[in-house]
Amino acid sequence: VILDHLTQVEETDLTLKEEVHKRTTATRISAARRVFVVAVVLVGGGIFLSQTNVFQNLGLTLLGTAGAVTLVLGFAARSILSNIMSSLQIALNGSAKIGDRIVFNDALCHVERIHFTYVQLRDWDGTRLVVPVTEFVSTPFKNWTMQEPEMLRIVKIKLTHTADVDALRDAFDKVIDALDEKYVGNRDDVCVRVAGQDVLGKDVWFLVPCADPNTSWEAACDAREGIMAEIHKLAEKEGVDYFPQATAAEAS
């Protein structure tokens, strides 16, 4: 209760890019709380046993069975202890902080809570993913918020071999200018690249610089919508097909 009162992070949107310090603080305090609870339980249990007559009453019988009891308790608690140590590992190495935006198992999420035995993630559609801590630390994931908040999102579109890339670059500049300024990062990173080709056409990548990973998905969606509209305008203007005319079987 005291830690919650001192930090008061519940009323702050930790997903905002300017809240980097509070994300780190909230994660460390969460780890400190877990360490404190474990220490209190262990110390309190030891004091309780030392102040009672349990050992005197049981005598040598307890000593004879202590080894077996220790083995049983250790086997039963191994999973819990492993999760607790893994949750502390997350806080120490900073791989994921409360409020970070990550991609875990192809799900775009925010780290909402780091508990003793599980990590609570909030998916972009509002649903919650509950992941055991040991699985979370052992599964690779993408952290969009780590280090610099700016990032590049790539919109990949398959076009015909005859599509005018220079005209697409001019059209893409118009799309970027039309985006909300809070979405766009460094405009020097705006570019169009032909990344590959096959019998159906060429793969054109449109690089969208995003200022904030928390709005990068929306920025990429808006950019894709604008690009598609501009491509249709170019196709009508030039009287040529910009999209490959292929059957479903050929496309697959």
Image (spheres, rainbow, N blue to C red):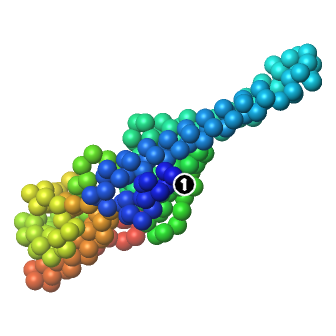
Name the residue nearer the viewer: 104 or 192: 104
**Quadrant location of the N terminus in the rendered image:** bottom right
Above/below status of 205 relative to 48: below
Residue lying farthest to the front in this orientation: 51
Question: How many marks overall?
Answer: 1
Name the residue nearer the viewer: 154 or 99: 99
Residue 190 showing in the rendered view: yes
Question: Which of the 4 image quadrants contains residue 245?
Answer: bottom left
Q: Is residue 21 left or right of residue 48?
A: left
Residue kind at label 1, given as amino acid type: Val
x%, y% of residue 138?
A: 51, 39
Above/below status of 186 relative to 167: above
Q: Secondary structure at mark 1?
A: loop
Above/below status of 192 relative to 172: above
Q: Residue at x 69, y 35 (%)?
A: 44
Q: Is residue 93 left or right of residue 161?
A: right
Q: Residue at x 44, y 41 (%)?
A: 91
Residue beneath label 1, please? 1
Name the residue nearer the viewer: 208 or 185: 185
**Quadrant location of the C terminus in the rendered image:** bottom left
x%, y% of residue 86?
A: 53, 37
Residue 200 showing in the rendered view: no
Q: Residue at x 76, y 33 (%)?
A: 48
Q: Is residue 123 left or right of residue 48?
A: left
Name the residue nearer the viewer: 112 or 38: 38
Q: Residues within 10 Å of mark 1 (few under 14, many from 20)?
A: few
x%, y% of residue 178?
A: 15, 76
Question: Which of the 4 image quadrants contains residue 6?
Answer: bottom left
